[in-house]
Amino acid sequence: QQHFSVKPLFKGKTFVITAGPTKEKIDPVRYFTNRSSGKMGYALAEQAAQMGAEVILVSGTDSLPPPKGVQIVPVESAEDMFHSVMKYASSADVIIKSAAVADYRPKQTFDSKMKKQPGNLIIEMERTKDILFELGQIKKHQFLVGFAAETNDMETYAKDKLVRKNADMIVGNNVSEKGAGFAGDTNIVTIFHKDFSTVSLPLMSKQETAKRILLEISKKWGDDHH
Ligand code: CTP
Ligand code: CA
């Protein structure tokens, strides 16, 4: 009787995955955030770990159970996420930016609670760092994957992000389609590769979507990674 052992696909590889929303502080009791649940990023982390990878999950949410065998790095703001991702980026083989990072944060924050005043309140917002873009500038051997959440013209915007941010793959997400996007347990995505080939996946669970995304990564990184 012979025994065969199959080497897990990602054995010996390190993944850095970001998930969930960021929280941008206004004062000690208030912040700006978005509707991201973190489920897609957590599914990617869980599946990558099951395929043998070492996974560091930089997470903006604490409302999901941590996947088995995954190291969680909790963060709040886009700035926190930037520093945590940069800390682990050089040891990563694959970086997946599935987090919904705030594009703006309050320009001024307050150390004590803001009191209400008569009339309207205007909060001035400033841009956060684009973490995916910064990773694209410094990447060496890493395979870099971004997401694109769109409500329209997904192909145009996703391909633009692929090129502009120097990513190897963009996962396009039509967040206005039923069964896709932020809150639920299912997704409908189209994968855009650097060679501009595309793979459109039907409605499926986020766990199944995660598996398919990881298989696409494993197919492509042989091209110019190892
Ligand atoms: N992203 C990031 N840092 C930011 C904003 C976005 O790393 N400050 C990443 C996201 O994690 C995602 C990708 O960039 O992987 C695309 O995010 P998205 O919000 O779709 O695109 P933006 O470039 O922010 O453009 P816009 O929101 O105007 O469509
Ligand atoms: Ca954005």
Image (tube, rainbow, N blue to C red):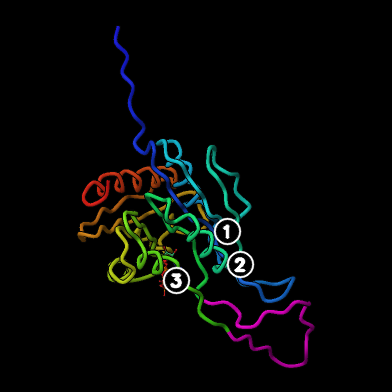
Residue 5 lies, with reference to residue 145, above or below; the image says above
At 35% from the left and 57% from the top, the residue drawn is 144
Q: Residue 108: x and y, percent?
A: 65, 83
Single out the residue that lies furthest toward the bottom.
119
Quarter assignment of residue 148: bottom left
Mark 1 and mark 3: Cα distance apart in space: 16 Å
Label 3 vs 2, first from the N-terminus = 2
Mark 1 and mark 2: Cα distance apart in space: 8 Å
Q: What residue is disc 1 on?
A: 60
Query: Which numbered disc, 3 or 2, marks the residue closer to the eye?
Result: 3
Which of the two residues, 123 or 188, is positioned nearer the viewer here? 123
Q: What residue is disc 3 on?
A: 130
Q: What residue is disc 2 on?
A: 23
- Mark 1 and mark 2 in contact? Answer it, CB < 8 Å: yes
Q: Residue 129: x and y, percent?
A: 48, 73
Segment tinted magenta in the rendering: 104-124
Label 1 vs 3, first from the N-terminus = 1
Label 2: which secondary element: loop
